[in-house]
Image (cartoon, grey):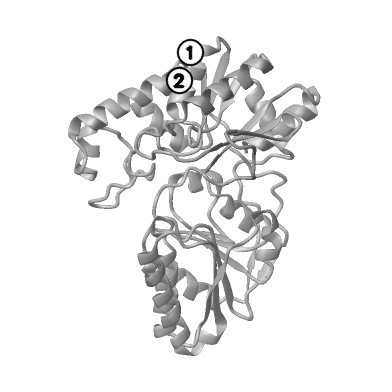
Amino acid sequence: MAKRLFDAHLRKHGPDSALFIGASIKEGPRRAAGSNLLQVAQQEFLYITESFDYLYFTNFDASGQSDLLRLIESFAPTTVHCHHFMGFGVDFLQALQAKLQVRTVFTLHEHMVVCQNDGHLLQRNNQRICRDIHAARCATCLPQYRYDYFQHRLDHMAGLVGAFDVVTAVSKFTADVVSSAIKTKAPIVVIPNGPVDAVPAATSIDLRAGLNIAYIGQIHRTKGVHVLLEAMLMVAKRRPRQVDRMRVSVWGGILLEDYRQEIESLVQQLQDCGVFARLAGMYDSSNLRQVLSDANVVVVPSLWPESYCITADEAVMHGKVLLCSDFPAARERFEEGGSVRFFAPGSAVQLATQFEDLLGMQDVKVLSPFTYKYQSFDEIYDAYEEHY
């Protein structure tokens, strides 16, 4: 998103009007020894840090951060727009605020500023969504930390985020959760990051041959991939005569070894039942049309309340049935009905019911369910420029 905003700025204001700096942790193109910065194009740089502390959100790279500050100062900006602190470090953002007397904007793409549980807002003891942030609740969720750590953490993040002149969020849910815990200079502005040119590719989706299901994304427990496979296994056991009408491809990389074993076991159980099931491996996110070419159903089974899910947008725009976990930001983006259906997060039973319903249908009518619609990314940029 940040790169697309940069490109939109250049289209509107000219080739030398903006500076873009991306961050990469450990991996990146080769660069000169001792250098943390790599110029990849005119006015475009990549900052590569060797390590990152995911507890305190710093990379312990004082020299690299100094290089970044000198680069930004040399550009003499009037506005600095920060999209995250990952890779850069919260200490760098604070140094930036102290060093440059310019207008600053921060965009919340997730919930790490208020949630130590990887920003997932899931209470570990009951899996409920955490909407009201409080140190006592955090300490119950993550008892390995001292109670006062959470208060200090929230105070620190409040000082960081509250110092920005403008704070934006990609969903109202994210804005509401963060604003309930952190006071900002002005109310958090909600600017959705799409969809662009949101016209579905088809008027109806053919289901006569059965369901060809796709999952796309990281293969991690919080993404609920096991829920998808468990739901298919329920249907296969209840309706053995339908197994040849179900296929599933799971696209993405598996992050944890114990979860790999669980997912591979579920895939094998589906295969033993006669269902075509496979781990399809990594995919090119810029070529989702080809990745989804054989699928007619896309499942987004996330267990946590994502602030935005590009896979859901892509599924609808490419003319697929979307079965989506019922999290708040998804409800903001889509109207339920026809080819868009919701199920309770973590409920393999409800998802299995949706599969069985679709198996009994010849086709599904496609309507444009988006509540947000943009004709081009330039329109999204214009919404940000109002606050620059």
**Disc 1 target residue:** 98
Looking at the figure, which quarter contains the N terminus?
A: top right
Under circle 2, the secondary element is helix
Q: Along the line of sight, which residue is nearer the eye, 194 or 97?
A: 97
The three-letter code of the residue at mark 1 reads Ala
The three-letter code of the residue at mark 2 reads Gln
Circles 1 and 2: CB atoms closer than 8 Å: yes
Q: Along the line of sight, which residue is nearer the eye, 250 or 255?
A: 255
Instruction: State the image coordinates of residue 143 (x, y, percent, origin top left).
Output: 19, 43
Task: Name the residue at 30% across, 35% down.
Answer: 132
As drawn, 228 above or below 141: below
Looking at the figure, which quarter contains the C terminus?
A: top right
Q: Which mark is residue 94?
A: 2
Instruction: State the image coordinates of residue 97 (x, y, percent, origin top left).
Output: 50, 16
Task: Name the residue at 44% across, 45% down.
Answer: 328
Instruction: State the image coordinates of residue 145 (x, y, percent, origin top left).
Output: 21, 39
Name, please, the residue furthest toward the top: 101
> Which image quarter: residue 263?
bottom left
Q: Which mark is residue 27?
A: none
Give the class, few, some or many, for how many residues have Cα within 10 Å of label 2's Cα (few <14, many ≥20).
Answer: some
> Which image quarter: residue 371?
top right
In this rendering, does residue 387 appear at all?
A: no
Under circle 1, the secondary element is helix
Q: Is residue 321 left or right of residue 273?
A: right
Instruction: State the image coordinates of residue 357 (x, y, percent, origin top left).
Output: 50, 73
